[in-house]
Amino acid sequence: MTLPSRLTGVVPPVCTPLTPDYEVDTASLIRLVDHLVEGGSDGLFILGSTSEVAYLPDRQRRTVIDTVVGHVAGQLPVLAGVIDMTTLRVVEHARTALAGGVDALVVTAPFYTRTHPAEVARHFREVAARTGAPVFAYDQPVSVPLKLPSSLITELAGEGVLAGLKDSSGDEGSFRAVVLAARELSGFSVLTGSELTVDSALAMGADGVVPGLGNVDPAGYVRLYRAARAGDWEEAREEQERLLALFRMIHAGDPGRMGMSSSALGAFKAALHLRGIIDCPVTAVPQIPLSGSEVEYVGKHLAAAGLL
């Protein structure tokens, strides 16, 4: 499928189901993709943070690409994270993803290395030039110790280097600056990565949302998006508040024994397992698994949201 001239709507970052021995569970991944498509998703983002991309060896990344692209078979655009520390490593992942049939690439700034803003700009230009593919910048300062300046995003978008932005920075001022600039840019898509302020982002003029919680309840985010697009802001607010309550499942894990990644990704996978969508809720090592009582906490949130 060719990427739309401007990607809009709900584009969940697809979880990567794993087997008990930490291989990609392709049967569960296919069921998850069907769940997301049936929920009304407008696209799929594989191999991002919610996909546990940082934990997956290259062969598992390829398995995810082949499984999702092959199963979707052009029904929806598929974006793939080609996340790595430096430019040529990213380009190598990008070529693998494009050979597998993805429609666009999602790229962070370089990390681990200490880069100057000019080098960050060169990084995105080189990836776009060497692949010839649509590139979405991924602003994720919690994982990449750099906040992409809105001025850099709009400069690269104006050059045609970037096709869009997935903003998970939490910086609403910077996000709004890009939204405003995008009004003058043909075909540039601005997507929020926040599960919790989608109604506000859409009111600002964002094109869509990439919500991790959308794995669990894609239909809820689709209802929110459609209500906002129809100008029914009261319905959008009510749906956003329902999703806000559901999102509290990410606090299932005890912070005294696990990090937030283990808790949040563990909660999403536990929810998918409880809903019968994936066979096993295991997260990649070295993340700590949720306990039985913590899984019960997730189940209570699902029940309260009417999802069990």
Image: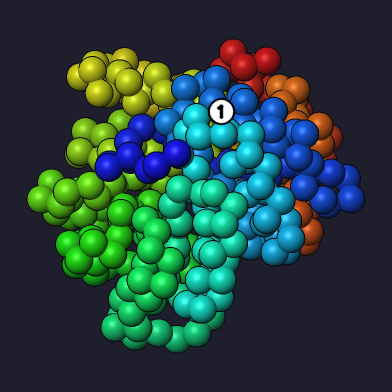
The one of 96 and 52 positioned closer to us in this rendering: 96
Task: Say what secondary structure mark 1 lies in.
Answer: helix
Quarter occupied by the N terminus: top left
* Residue 232 visible within the image: yes
Quarter occupied by the C terminus: top right
The quarter of the picture where residue 286 lies is bottom right
The residue under the point 45% across, 48% down is: 103
Residue 213 % position (x, y)? 54, 35
Q: Is residue 302 left or right of residue 192?
A: right
* Residue 194 visible within the image: no
Q: Residue furthest left?
A: 184
Residue 161 % position (x, y)? 28, 64
The residue under the point 37% across, 56% down is: 134
The residue under the point 63% across, 34% down is: 71
The residue under the point 50% across, 43% down is: 78
Above or below for 130 versus 119? above
Q: How is the image coloured?
A: rainbow
Q: Is residue 7 left or right of residue 261?
A: left
Q: Is residue 266 left or right of residue 280?
A: left
The quarter of the picture where residue 150 lies is bottom left
The one of 173 and 45 positioned closer to us in this rendering: 45
**How packed is label 1: few (under 14 Cα within 10 Å), some, or many (20 or more)?**
many
Residue 32 % position (x, y)? 65, 31
Residue 246 % position (x, y)? 54, 28
Q: What residue did someone put label 1 on?
A: 36
The one of 253 and 100 positioned closer to us in this rendering: 100
**Count of numbered marks:** 1
Identify the amino acid type marked 1: Leu
The quarter of the picture where residue 124 lies is bottom left
The one of 63 and 156 positioned closer to us in this rendering: 63
